[in-house]
Amino acid sequence: MAGTGLLGTTHFRLEKQRAFIQGHGEQCLVFPVVQCSCLLADHQFDPNCYACHGTGRFYPPNTAYSTILLMVREASRRTFNDPGTWIPGTIQASILPGVRLCDRDKIRRLDITETFTDEVLTRGLDETLRFPSGVTLDLVADRDRVYQPGRDYILTPPNTVTWVAGGQSPAFMQQYSVKYSAQPDYLCTPDNPRSRVEHRTPQSQVVLLTRLDYLAEGL
């Protein structure tokens, strides 16, 4: 019962939970996390680690799997501060019974894309977009010109801007802006501790998803 701490009297059937999540949910890719082994002598993660980039999150290759998540509730709000605007918030999601997510697993939503306009790249230095999946470049420009896809640049999969020989391009080390769509990544936080057992059978898990680029620069 809400706000009382009581578990309530509602009973659940596993097959109905599974059918509801499969019928109303969306396809997601889960990247299981382990703690990175780059600990230094002071038990801090190596900021120069090639695997976790100092975050402590290591996603072993070839371990990702697909599952269905039901997005239940969303909470977000745009705030304004001196550096600019910020949109903190979370998504509450239900997981298929039998699938267990843990803290800091990475979740990629496969059925939607979002548009990003807040990245500035540097010619010849940093030309990799923040999100790596389902990328479509919509606009590449600097203060002098708008560059043309195919003639001036192409997208090298999964998420690198490559300039075409003979086309126009920014000067070496010059900054330019990009607008693109991609499948967003989220960081998972289970809402433990919470009891979800019905007749000695574990029920659907609930997690909170926070978009990863709002938490850290390195994905």
Image (spheres, rainbow, N blue to C red):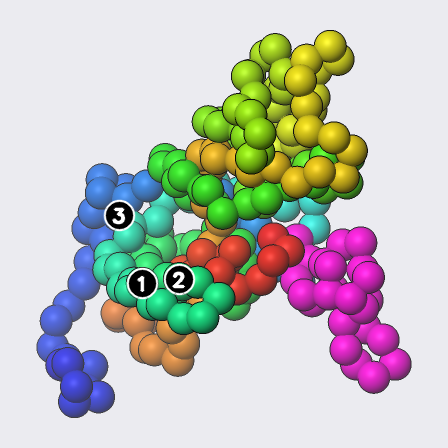
Give the label on residue 78, or none.
Answer: 1
Query: Which region shows up in magenta?
Result: 36-59
Asked if the magenta segment contains residue 50, the reply would be yes
Q: Is residue 101 visible?
A: no
Which residue bears the numbered disc 3? 21
Q: Is residue 119 visible?
A: yes
Residue 10 at x, y percent in the picture: 12, 71
Q: Nearer the viewer, residue 147 or 215?
A: 147
State which tag comes first along the sequence, 1 or 3: 3
Q: Secondary structure at mark 2?
A: strand
Amino acid carrying mark 1 in the image: Arg
| In contact (CB < 8 Å): disc 2 and disc 1 | yes
Q: Secondary structure at mark 1?
A: loop
Q: Would residue 80 appear left or right of 32 to someone viewing this image?
A: left
Give the label on residue 85, or none.
Answer: 2
Q: Would residue 57 appear left or right of 198 to someone viewing this image?
A: right
Q: Secondary structure at mark 3?
A: helix
Amino acid carrying mark 3 in the image: Ile
**Which quarter of the figure has residue 153?**
top right
